[in-house]
Amino acid sequence: MDVFHPDHAGPARLGQAAERAKTARQTVRHLFELREFVARQEARDLRQWAQLVDADTSLPPASPKTP
């Protein structure tokens, strides 16, 4: 990858650099959105799993002890 310096670039190079910067910003934004989506999905899955575990391990109602 070549080094970009605005003093040595013509209008075409400046346009290319601006387009690459825009693409990079979009990529970073999409990665953050994906990370948030995955975190929400994992939280939902953990809640569902906890509900299943709670339902599976619940004890039957206590019966009164007879002397």
Image: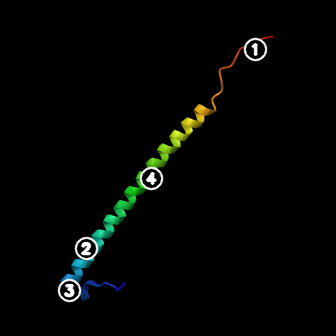
Disc 1 versus disc 4: distance between alpha carbons? 50 Å
Disc 4 versus disc 2: distance between alpha carbons? 28 Å
Q: Are marks 1 and 3 in contact (CB under 8 Å)?
A: no
- Dot 4: few (<14), some (14–19), or many (≥20) neighbours within 10 Å? few
Q: Looking at the rendered structure, which numbered label has been put on residue 25?
A: none
Disc 1 is placed on an element classified as: loop
Q: Tell me residue 23's x, y (percent).
A: 30, 69
Tell which of 52 and 40 is nearer to you.
52
| 42 with respect to 65 (left or right) | left
**Sequence-first tag of 2 and 1:** 2
Instruction: Name the amino acid, label 2.
Output: Glu
The extreme right residue here reads 67
In the rendered image, which residue does mark 2 sit on?
19
Q: Tell me residue 56's x, y (percent).
A: 61, 33
In the rendered image, which residue does mark 4 sit on?
38
**Sequence-first tag of 3 and 2:** 3
Q: Residue at x 34, y 65 (%)?
A: 27
Disc 2 versus disc 1: distance between alpha carbons? 78 Å
User: In this rendering, is residue 50 above or below 35?
Assistant: above
In the rendered image, which residue does mark 1 sit on?
65
